[in-house]
Amino acid sequence: MAERYQTLKRAYSGYHRNQAGPNLELAQVGPDTPGGEYLRRFWHPIELSSSVQDRPVALRVLGEDLVLFRDLSGNLGLLDKHCPHRGASLEFGKITECGIQCCYHGWHFACDGTLLETPVHPDARYAGRLFHAAYPVRETAGLIFAYMGPPDRTPDFPHFDFFDDDVEGRILYKRPSPCNWIQTRDNEVDNDHGYFLHTVMAGIQLTTAHQELAKINLFETHSGLITTQSRRVGKNIFVRINAMILPNLSRIACIEDGQGNMVFDRRGPIVHWSVPVDDENCFVIGWNTVAANLPDKKLNAYMDRERAAGHDLYTHPQLNFTFGQDGERSYAERQRIPGDWDAWVSQGPIHIHALEHLVPGDGAIVRYRGMLRDGIRAVAAGEDPKGLVSRVTRPLETYASNTAIPVPQASTLADDAALIDEVERELVARTLDGTYRDGYRHPRQEQESSVETDR
């Protein structure tokens, strides 16, 4: 166990600070490492469907070098990158009707790894008897997923509810980060950073509602945890719920200004996974969505009002939140207005948790890391980790939503804070037990079904 960071007691004490190393239990992702074996028990998206056309795609995932291809019959294959004959890379292979041939001597592999023929070595007698390393893949919603764990423990492919969202369009992306994957996921459960990084440092990034500190809470779910941000916005109580699904999936509620009137609005979320490349690199892959049927005449969320005003939601700086999510801007620009990518990459290739000074507001980070450790140790003990999917019979519930409802302000700040907490608890309870479908109305809520926009 790495030594905890020692709080220094006087100025100019750099020489006396503790030295510590990374938490390898969490950080390592390769084969035969505790963290790598845990991650291999889940399906992971590895590439955009649009990137796999008429040529093989070389990629590195969970510390393994692989090649992904679509044969001429349309079947996907994911094989070890190096041909088992002489080690040439299959990224230079010839795609065939039923697989891929190595460029060097023509060894021919099916999508499941079966060696079909050895044309330059017809006397080798390996065809039909030798298998190259291969992994199963699935394609859905514009992404290609792989399962890289033990075949006899293959879970059902998780059909999340957001696969069925009614959307006008998905804006798909795959963004690399030169750092350990957990740094990007810590960022997702760290709701406190939204106030400073996304408003004080760069006020252009979020709506005015986010320029005030919110009350932050976390709640465990059957598949991970949800975090809440609750605040008063004028006449409204505004509660935003984001979800982290183990081990590496986030569903983020659409950016909202809290000035409209809607309950459990699940439209237009950000959905993305952080997939390890190796211990010191990862990529975030997923999509932003533009909801269908905007503006919705029954609702007046921020997205409805922005579309009604004629704004293009595909390039909208808040609703299509892309600013600061990669390292494409110049170094000087990123110093002046840093984004999420700059924050998590600047922590180093593998952030050293033992050097942190965590505070009560970091509770979601502490709990998330604890859930990862629990899952890693469960797999090491031969058990199934939390969040693993089996026997899927209906879409798997995820929880991101926005609620903004008119509730008269209490007479004192303390009473109003208690009122906001009460509303939040009720919204979370209904979210987790599925009764959000019945809506919600607080006893103190104004009778009008809508409220005049308070700008």
Image (spheres, rainbow, N blue to C red):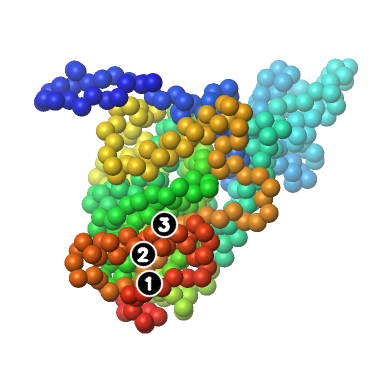
SS at badge 1:
loop
SS at badge 2:
helix
Amino acid type, callout 2: Val
* Label annotation for residue 241: 3
- Is residue 269 visible in this depiction of the protein? no
* Label annotation for residue 428: none
Residue under the image location 27 percent in, 39 percent down? 359
Taking the view exactly as shown, the residue that stands out farthest to the left is 11
Q: Where is residue 7 in the image (x, y as percent from the top left)?
A: 20, 27
Q: Foreground residue, 118 or 447?
A: 447
Question: Which mark is nearer the camera, 1 or 3?
Answer: 1
- Is residue 410 visible in this depiction of the protein? yes
Look at the image and tell me in which quarter the C terminus lies: bottom left
Residue under the image location 66 percent in, 41 percent down? 155
Marks 1 and 3, Cα distance to the nearest angstrom?
18 Å
Amino acid type, callout 3: Ile
Mark 1 or mark 2: name the one nearer the start of the chain. 2
Check if mark 1's residue and mark 2's residue have beta carbons within 8 Å. Answer: yes
Residue where numbered disc 2 is placed: 423
Mark 3 or mark 2: name the one nearer the start of the chain. 3
Residue 231 vertical placement versus 79 (above, below): below
Residue under the image location 25 percent in, 55 percent down? 213
Residue where numbered disc 1 is placed: 442
